[in-house]
Image: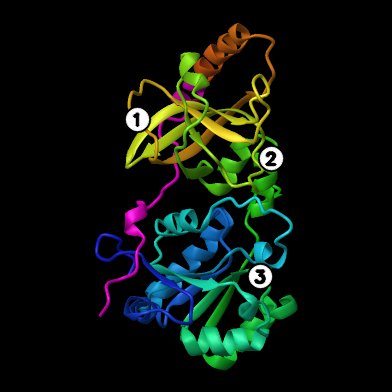
Amino acid sequence: MNDRTLQPFIVAPGLRGGGAAVEAGRSALRGAVVAIGNFDGVHRGHRAAIAAACAHARALGRPAAALTFEPHPRSFLHPEAPLFRLSDAAGKLRLLARTGLDGAIVLDFDAHLATLTAESFVVDILVGALGVSGAMIGHNFLFGSNRSGTPQYLTEQGARHGFAVHVVPHFTIGDRQVSSGAIRAALAAGDTATATEMLGAPWFVTGEVIHGEKRGRDLGYPTANLRLDPGCGLRHGIYAVRIGIDGERHDGVASFGRRPTFDNGAPLLEIHLFDFAGDLYGRILDVAFIGYIRDELKFSSVEALVAQMNEDSSAARDLLAQNPAAFPRLAPRGEIALPPAA
């Protein structure tokens, strides 16, 4: 059930409403062994739970699926506090589609789900709607209203309802615990090496190229500009990046910040692609952060800025040459789709 060349990655959105295609997705994943979580970033700890789900599913002859939530529960419960998401909804699914899973079930995290009791989550969703054959969770997974459902409770309920629950221990690298929070902290410090190690691949963002002030073109460094999510907590600075455009890879250097030499405006990701000529306006780019070069600085003159940009480009080329294959494993956006209606 895990051969991506034989069947598409199935996404079954929500549990209420929808047409024939949605019902077909639910039907295809009914009886799955599920790995449950937010999976922000799909880091190495998440992948341990996913690997356990895939192994158990193979043993049972069942599909393996991620059971996840959108929007992120923290964003729904605390909309006043912007969340630095490591992967948006689409990016998360593209990452999950390259883990060996057969599909993903995306639960709408809304007022109904937020107030659902732990018992109802098990009885109504896991057993009633999904008919799960097994569940894999992290050791700190909590669910149900007021986070009252614990791993022990789910294990007991699984035994009662006929599905096994496996609690995956915390994933560590040396003495460091891998978590989405730890990765956010690393990126906020510009520590791309730690973020990459915990994720298992470089952190990336996806966005549409927008029009900018075109200053880079005048400076000899034309850029493709992306407006990132307002909650993005990446440290402002200069990075070596690798860009994916419709399956092709291009190396480059990028600045993320407020452009203090010019306008100190809203944060913008400005990407200069090496040895590239072409119009990228309106195109969708995947941008992987391979290495941190320096902080964002204010320069006394344009000449000083250009001299530094020349040095930054050289440093970026060196970092990229040291990591020639570094890029996250992502399914093409077009591969993530509902199955055809029956």
First along the sequence among labels 2 and 1: 2
Q: Secondary structure at mark 2?
A: helix
Task: Please provide the residue range marked out in magenta.
Answer: 316-342
Which mark is nearer the camera, 3 or 1? 1
Q: Which residue is mark 2?
A: 188
Q: Nearer the viewer, residue 313 or 324?
A: 313
Residue type at tag 1: Asp
User: Residue 324 falls in which quadrant of the image?
Assistant: top left
Residue placed under numbered mark 1 in the picture:
279
Q: CA distance from mark 3 to mark 2?
A: 25 Å
Q: Earlier in the sequence, mark 3 or mark 1?
A: 3
Dot 3: element: loop
Residue 334 highlighted magenta (yes or no): yes
User: Mark 3 is on which residue type?
Assistant: Phe
Who's the residue at 67% across and 79% down the image?
Answer: 144
Q: Is 148 placed left or right of 13 in the picture?
A: right
Which quadrant of the figure has residue 100?
A: bottom left
The type of residue carrying mark 2 is Ala
